[in-house]
Image: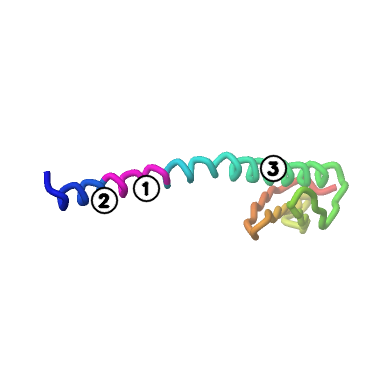
């Protein structure tokens, strides 16, 4: 095996190793992102339940999340409720339901 062949083989092995490292790095970030989205969904559902109980709080925030609740008439005896949760970095989760008007 010549020096040139050895260098080419080393480059190929290095590129393969870099590809594997990128896969492992992205896998390490996924649990954190899943945890953030789970918190956002739970926070939105909490806001929706408060609206159902008649306790509408337009804007609140906690743990890097902010929640905005809007309620508007949809039809007779039915309201359109939107709960928008904004995460750090500007990502948004919106929960929208039709609920019986109080």
- What is the number of the mark on residue 28? none
x 59%, y 45%: residue: 33
Where the N terminus falls, by quadrant? Answer: top left
> What is the spatial separation of the Cα atoms under label 2 and label 1, in whole angstroms?
11 Å
- Residue 14 is inside the magenta segment: yes
Residue hosting label 3 = 39
Residue placed under numbered mark 2 in the picture:
11
Q: For this rendering, which residue is in front, 40 or 10?
A: 10
Q: Secondary structure at mark 2?
A: helix
Q: Is residue 40 magenta?
A: no
- Checking the image for residue 18, the label placed there is 1
State how far apart marks 3 and 1 are (Cα): 33 Å
Instruction: Report the span colored magenta.
Output: 13-21
Residue depicted at x 76% and y 48%: 63
Image coords of residue 51 (percent x, y): 81, 47
Q: Nearer the viewer, mark 3 or mark 1?
A: 1
| Disc on the earlier residue, 3 or 1 | 1
Residue 77, horizontal then vertical, whole percent: 79, 50
Outermost residue to the right: 55
In the foreground, 43 or 36:
36
The vertical placement of 42 against 11, above or below, is above
Query: What is the chief secondary structure element of the magenta stretch?
Result: helix
């Amino acid at each position: 095996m010549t020096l040139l062949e050895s260098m080419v083989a080393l480059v190929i092995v290095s590129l393969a190793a870099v590809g594997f490292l990128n896969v492992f790095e992205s896998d390490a970030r996924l649990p954190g992102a899943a945890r953030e989205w789970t918190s956002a969904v739970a926070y939105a559902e909490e806001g929706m339940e408060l609206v159902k109980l008649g306790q509408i709080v337009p804007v609140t925030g906690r743990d890097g999340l902010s929640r905005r609740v809007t309620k508007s008439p949809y039809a007779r005896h039915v309201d359109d409720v939107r709960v928008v949760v904004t995460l750090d970095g500007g990502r948004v989760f919106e929960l929208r339901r039709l609920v019986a008007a109080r």
